[in-house]
Amino acid sequence: LHSTAESHGIDHTHAVLARSFCEEGQSHWSKRLLLEPEPVGSGCIAQYLLPERSARPEPSCFPWLRPRKQGSEAVPARRVAVKVVHPHVRWSVDMDLGLLAFFAAIFERLGLDHLGVSLALRQFAAFLEAQTDLTIEAENLRTLRRHFSDMGGKVAIPEVFDAFVSHDALVMGFEDGEPLSTLLESGDRSLQLDAWRTLVDSFWAMVFRYRFVHGDLHPGNILWRRQGDRVQLVLLDCGLTINLGGEAGEDLSKMVKAFLTKSEEEVATLLVDLSERVGGRPEDVVDKPGFVRGISDLIRQGKACNFQLNRLNAGALMGRSLILGRRHRVRFDARFVNLMVAMVVVQGVAMTLNGGGEIVSRMHPFLFVVAQS
């Protein structure tokens, strides 16, 4: 979360919690949650809250769920994080989307629908919805927590408390940890390399094994904690994800197979063919050979340095590929564009941990599974 983002007052938080969790027949939320009036952090969409210091069972910096009875057994108090959407966020989003829809309609009336403005608007609307609807983040948390349960405890995802999930509020289990900057400052090379391996492996696992990717893994959304001589990473803020299931997963498998077995030109040609999945039309493509040459050159640049992080500017390659798509009117699936952005973000974090790391070397086991399938 950005510490400089403006926070909202405790009155709004109380109103949201009452509106979300005090339906007829339910006990008041304050009988279960202990809150501090000051937030621990605030982003552009929502903020997290601190505990009620006078009532917490032990020293903490987050809220608590009060102990309660479940049948004949007592359920102990739990440290939690409470996330609440800022006021007027939904109004602002609706205004922005209305304005964009107006301009999209103008583009279509002018016969410029080949630019894909309407498609881009729908994709951007889905992106904003994922950021402002905390029920979506709750479901993403459940999915990622279930996926990472088979990684031997290397990655932790906050637990969702189902009784406290709404569009505007979300209660999660508290996950203790330190920011990655403290790991870099520690100078412990062994722990830094272990964190690098876990970060890269978890990213490729999300892409190729689970087909469900955390789309915003910047340093502020990653904590670390030590477990003996190993590092465990905690992934936070899961509102933005990339679902690679269905046709997107099939297309990903095709691209991976082509990347491993075919020429650069054949890979680029496949990109043109796959653009029809997202509304692209062959007759709209301008200078197809030029697009194939441009993409082929980018692939060769990546292969020439073995995709080493310290020699590869993934952000620049992504930007040039998008420019080629726009220039030649070849549409890219928004999920793959978001995946490229997510990979660039992970690249930046990984470079701080291990600048000489070879990302392809960690990808091989996951690519082998995809190639087999």
Image (spheres, rainbow, N blue to C red):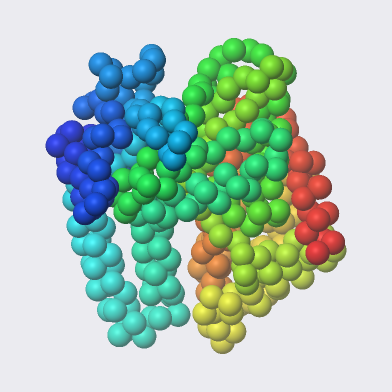
Q: Is residue 92 visible?
A: no
In this rendering, the answer to whether 125 lies above or below 275 is above
In this rendering, the answer to whether 96 lies above or below 203 is below
Q: Is residue 145 left or right of residue 164?
A: right
Q: Is residue 139 left or right of residue 32?
A: right
- Label total for image: 0
Camera-side residue of 141 and 42: 141
Q: Is residue 214 left or right of residue 258?
A: left
Q: Quadrant of residue 16?
A: top left
In this rendering, the answer to whether 211 lies above or below 59 is below
Residue 97 image position (x, y, % from top left): 28, 65
Q: Quadrant of the N terminus?
A: top left
Q: Is residue 112 visible?
A: yes
Q: Quadrant of the C terminus?
A: bottom right
Camera-side residue of 86 and 310: 86
Q: Is residue 368 left or right of residue 230?
A: right
Q: Quadrant of residue 63?
A: top left
Residue 107 image position (x, y, % from top left): 32, 78
Measuring 30% from the left and 33% from the top, which residue is drawn there?
A: 33
Which residue is most to the front? 72
Camera-side residue of 350 and 355: 350
Measuring 49% from the left and 40% from the top, which residue is drawn there?
A: 159
Residue 75 image position (x, y, % from top left): 44, 32
Q: Quadrant of residue 199?
A: top right
Measuring 54% from the left and 79% from the top, which residue is drawn there?
A: 280
Measuring 77% from the left and 50% from the top, which residue is drawn there?
A: 366
